[in-house]
Image (cartoon, rainbow, N blue to C red):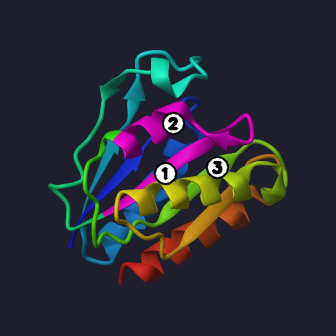
Amino acid sequence: MNIGILVHSKTGNTLSVVKLLEERLRKNGHTVSIERIVPDNEDQPDKSKVMLVSAPSASKFDSIILAGPVHGFSPTPAIVKWIEGSGDLSGRNIPLVITQQLPFPFMGGNRTVRKLTELLQTQGATVPVSSIVNWGSGKRQMLTDNAVNKVSEYLK
């Protein structure tokens, strides 16, 4: 399967998780590309003012994974902008990988998954699995391994 991992990563934390996921998916026999979602201004909180310098297309992949961090207890404006501009995602099952600095999922991770799931549903997609890696929890490696296992198992 040709899989695209579409990622927004400001600090590199989310990117480090998806690189491990890419490695696992390749070992499982998939063709995998990591493509960055890049805003013109990382610090712009208003999605209406965010322009995407890089907005990868989902259409060239059999399956996509969407990955991004939590900012201010919510998805980043760049991820929201990408979903809103992605066009029709009907019939797509899109796993989510979310990272956050705070130690517990209820501190923004759960809300981010809910919001992204709702936005993807408006574009016709579903979210079959999601994972949250809490960077400050002290269980980062275990949560990273769980995310890699969960998503790669779904895409077997």
The extreme front residue here reads 122
Q: Quadrant of residue 146?
A: bottom right
Write the start and end of the magenta stretch as one range. Answer: 64-84
- Residue 35 location (% of width, % of height): 31, 43
Evaluate if marks 3 and 1 touch, with contact meaning CB atoms under 8 Å apart. yes
Evaluate if marks 2 and 1 touch, with contact meaning CB atoms under 8 Å apart. yes
Instruction: Kindly report the distance in space between the C-alpha atoms of the residues bearing marks 2 and 3.
Output: 9 Å
Q: Secondary structure at mark 3?
A: strand
Give the numbered dot on residue 99.
Answer: 3
Residue found at x 42% / y 35%: 81
Give the numbered dot on residue 67.
Answer: 1
Mark 1 or mark 2, which is nearer the start of the sequence? Answer: 2
Residue found at x 60% / y 53%: 115
Q: Secondary structure at mark 2?
A: loop
Residue found at x 51% / y 36%: 9
- Residue 143 location (% of width, % of height): 69, 64
Q: Quadrant of the C terminus?
A: bottom left
Q: Is residue 67 magenta?
A: yes
Q: Nearer the viewer, residue 31 or 128?
A: 128
| Above/below status of 17 relative to 148 | above
| Above/below status of 10 relative to 59 | above
Instruction: Kindly report the distance in space between the C-alpha atoms of the residues bearing marks 3 and 1.
Output: 8 Å
| Above/below status of 54 relative to 118 | above
The extreme left residue here reads 60
Given the image, on which type of amino acid does mark 2 rest? Ser
Give the numbered dot on residue 9.
Answer: 2
